[in-house]
Image (cartoon, rainbow, N blue to C red):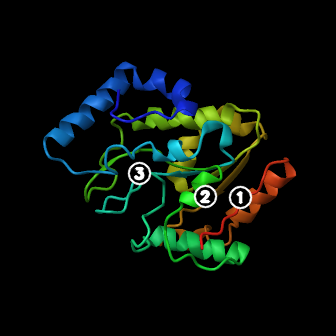
């Protein structure tokens, strides 16, 4: 298996995938790449951090990213998040602009999204590792099966949840989840917050207020989106 501790609440979901032939192949490939001196982000021990901070039974909102940031000191194991003190990447800056417009909250100074994760916002990338300076370099090596199992487990619950799908990649990855067509969950689709596409439907999509309205109407606690 991969050299990561699988959180207890996700163990039954992930162990069949990680112990499969493809799961073992993924683990072996990562080990060989690191043995060759390849710099991979985020570092070992943090690659399942999204699952560590957000237990399966606590998930209220899923925000689905693509793969981790590929610059030194950026990736944390949480989609779109960066450590405190790190300059905000352009997509995250646009997310904060929409947060301000949507809820009137002040623009956060820090890009650390840990408080969201601790409240039940699953900040999950489709692919959980990346080679330094090579965006998308670990697509297709096996992480997709791991994260698809996580999404499927959330969608299969009777508990109404929100799936926030920014951009074509996230929307395509979620298209294989039949439970999202039942109407039990709220699915928010819009353009990606990247500077290349944010003005084509991300700005003005109001994902934060829409998520809270849905949660409240279904008897679930709202997310406090403040990061100050």
Residue at (44% x, 37% y) in the render = 144
CA gap between label 1 and label 3 equals 24 Å
Q: Give the quadrant of residue 96.
A: bottom right
Q: Secondary structure at mark 1?
A: loop
**Picture coordinates of residue 60, whole percent (x, y):** 69, 47
Answer left or right for 31 relative to 5: left
**Picture coordinates of residue 117, whole percent (x, y):** 58, 53
The residue to which callout 3 is attached is 67
Q: Residues within 10 Å of mark 2 (few under 14, many from 20)?
A: some
The residue to which callout 1 is attached is 223
Residue 176 visible: no
**Picture coordinates of residue 50, whole percent (x, y):** 50, 47
Residue at (30% x, 62% y) in the render = 71
Q: Secondary structure at mark 3?
A: loop
Q: Is residue 173 above or below residue 117?
A: above
Lower position in the chain sequence, tag 1 or tag 3? 3
Q: Give the quadrant of residue 22.
A: top left
Q: Secondary structure at mark 2?
A: helix
Q: Residues within 10 Å of mark 3 (few under 14, many from 20)?
A: many
Q: Give the quadrant of residue 21.
A: top left
Which of the two discs, 1 and 3, sits closer to the camera? 1
**Picture coordinates of residue 42, whole percent (x, y):** 34, 51
CA gap between label 1 and label 2 equals 7 Å
The residue to which callout 2 is attached is 116
CA gap between label 3 and label 2 equals 19 Å
Figure quadrant of the C terminus: bottom right
Lower position in the chain sequence, tag 1 or tag 2? 2
Figure quadrant of the N terminus: top left
The residue nearer to you, when weighing 193 against 123, is 123
Residue at (48% x, 53% y) in the render = 78
């Amino acid at each position: 298996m991969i050299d990561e501790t699988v959180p207890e609440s996700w163990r039954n979901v992930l162990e069949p995938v990680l112990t499969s032939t493809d799961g073992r192949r993924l683990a072996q490939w990562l080990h060989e790449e690191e043995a060759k001196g390849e710099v991979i982000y985020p570092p070992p021990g943090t690659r399942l951090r999204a699952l560590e901070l957000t237990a399966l039974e606590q998930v209220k909102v899923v925000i689905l990213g693509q793969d981790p940031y590929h610059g030194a000191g950026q990736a944390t194991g949480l989609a779109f998040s960066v450590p405190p003190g790190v300059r905000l990447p352009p997509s995250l800056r646009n997310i904060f602009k929409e947060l301000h417009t949507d809820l009137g909250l002040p623009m956060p100074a820090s890009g650390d999204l840990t408080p969201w994760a601790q409240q039940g916002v699953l900040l999950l990338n489709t692919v959980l590792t990346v080679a330094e300076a090579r965006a998308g370099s670990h697509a297709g090596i096996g992480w997709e099966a791991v994260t698809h199992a996580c999404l499927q487990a959330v969608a299969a619950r009777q508990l109404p949840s929100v799936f926030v799908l920014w951009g074509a990649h996230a929307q395509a990855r979620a298209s294989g989840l039949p439970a999202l067509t039942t109407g039990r969950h709220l699915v928010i689709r819009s353009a990606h917050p990247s500077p290349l596409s944010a003005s084509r439907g991300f700005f003005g999509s109001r994902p934060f207020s829409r998520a809270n309205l849905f949660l409240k109407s279904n008897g679930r606690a709202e997310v406090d989106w403040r990061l100050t």
